[in-house]
Amino acid sequence: MNFRPQVESLRGRVIGMMGELRRVLRKEWSLDKRTVRVIYKGLVVACASFGVGVWCDVLRFQNTRELVNRCQRRVLYRCMVFCRTVSMHAMQVLMGELPWDLAFLRRGVMFRAKRGDDFVPSVRFVSENIWFESGMGYFC
């Protein structure tokens, strides 16, 4: 099966959702960080990861991970007060969240474990590759 259209439609869904949330997440209202995190985790991540138990296998491809993480950058920029030049990795640290590719992979594995399905044999391999490809996985 091809889940690329599902992943590509993620950007449109996230942009539409953030447009609706723009009224609530205004920078002038200065919501505290805890409230923003509740909205982020409870609404945005949950809606963006809809059906991830089915399509988490696609996260083994680099272009899919890039598409997912691009969407996260847009959401993080809207949720917190950042300059546009702040890197996505810095935004993730300041927000205290995982990159979406890893968070979605975790949600997919948890979904499959609850259903009792067999895990994809490459789940561990995929997560290790994501870690090593990021440049953070090499220890000397």
Image (cartoon, grey):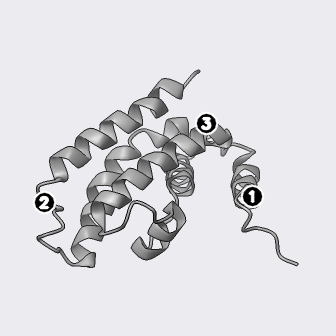
Q: Nearer the viewer, residue 130 or 57?
A: 130
Looking at the image, residue 94 lies above or below residue 120:
below
Residue 27, horizontal then vertical, whole percent: 18, 67
| Badge 2: residue crowd in 10 Å (few <14, some 14–19, many ≥20) | some
Pointer 1: what residue? 128
In the rendered image, which residue does mark 2 sit on?
A: 24
Image quadrant where one finds the N terminus? top right
Q: Nearer the viewer, residue 132 or 57?
A: 132
Q: Quadrant of residue 63?
A: top right
Mark 2 residue type:
Val
Looking at the image, which residue is at 30% across and 68% down? 80
Amino acid residing under circle 1: Glu
Q: Dots 3 and 2: beta carbons under 8 Å? A: no
Seen in the image, is 8 located left or right of residue 39?
right
* Nearest to N terminus: mark 1 or mark 3: 3
- Distance from label 2 to label 1 (Cα)? 38 Å
**Element on which disc 1 rests:** helix
| In this rendering, the label closer to the viewer, 3 or 2 | 2
Mark 3 secondary-structure assignment: helix
Q: Give the residue displayed 57% in from the left and 56% down from the top.
A: 102
Which residue is the site of mark 3?
58
Callout 2: SS: loop
> Which residue type does callout 3 highlight?
Val
Q: Residue 116 placed where, x, y %?
A: 56, 46
Q: Quadrant of the C terminus?
A: bottom right
Q: Is residue 34 left or right of residue 3?
A: left
Residue 36 is marked as: none
Q: In 3D space, how far apart are the residues under numbered discs 1 and 3 (Cα atoms)?
A: 15 Å
Q: Position of residue 13 (x, y in %)?
A: 31, 37
Distance CA(mark 3)–CA(mark 2): 33 Å
Q: Are marks 2 and 1 in contact (CB under 8 Å)?
A: no
